[in-house]
Image (tube, helix red, strand yellow):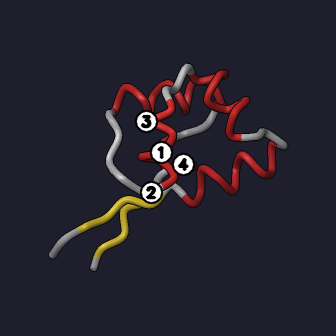
Amino acid sequence: MTSKVSYNNLFKLLIDMGLKKKDFAKLCNLSAPTMAKLSKNEYVSMDVLVRICDALKCNIEDIVEIKKN
């Protein structure tokens, strides 16, 4: 069984918070390649996920979902 990550919850949260991707990237100190990975539902480091959670004051399950195939 393979698993894939989904950051749809993160992008829904950004919409709810009224944050644009550019402002979000600046707030979390994320590079353009990292933003691209998030947009493509690719793996990012735990450090990135923790920085996002700290900046948005949320838990990891609020931003990432593991989808099993």
Per the model, the C-alpha gap separating discs 1 and 2 is: 6 Å
The answer to whether 21 is drawn above or below residue 56 in the figure is: below
Per the model, the C-alpha gap separating discs 4 and 3 is: 18 Å
Q: What is the quadrant of the C terminus in the image?
A: bottom left
Q: Which mark is residue 36?
A: 1
Under mark 2, the amino acid is Lys
Q: Residue farthest to the front?
A: 32
Which residue is under mark 3? 33
26 or 68, which is in the foreground?
Answer: 26
Q: Examine the image and state in which quarter residue 1 appears.
A: bottom left
Under mark 3, the amino acid is Pro
Q: Residues within 10 Å of mark 3 (few under 14, many from 20)?
A: few
Residue drawn at (69%, 56%) of the image: 12
Per the model, the C-alpha gap separating discs 2 and 3 is: 11 Å
Q: Residue farthest to the bottom?
A: 69
Residue drawn at (65%, 22%) of the image: 26
Image coordinates of residue 64 in percent, x first then y, are 47, 52
Image coordinates of residue 33 in percent, x first then y, are 43, 36
* SS state under label 3: helix
Under mark 1, the amino acid is Ala
Which residue is under mark 2? 40
Q: Which mark is residue 63?
A: 4
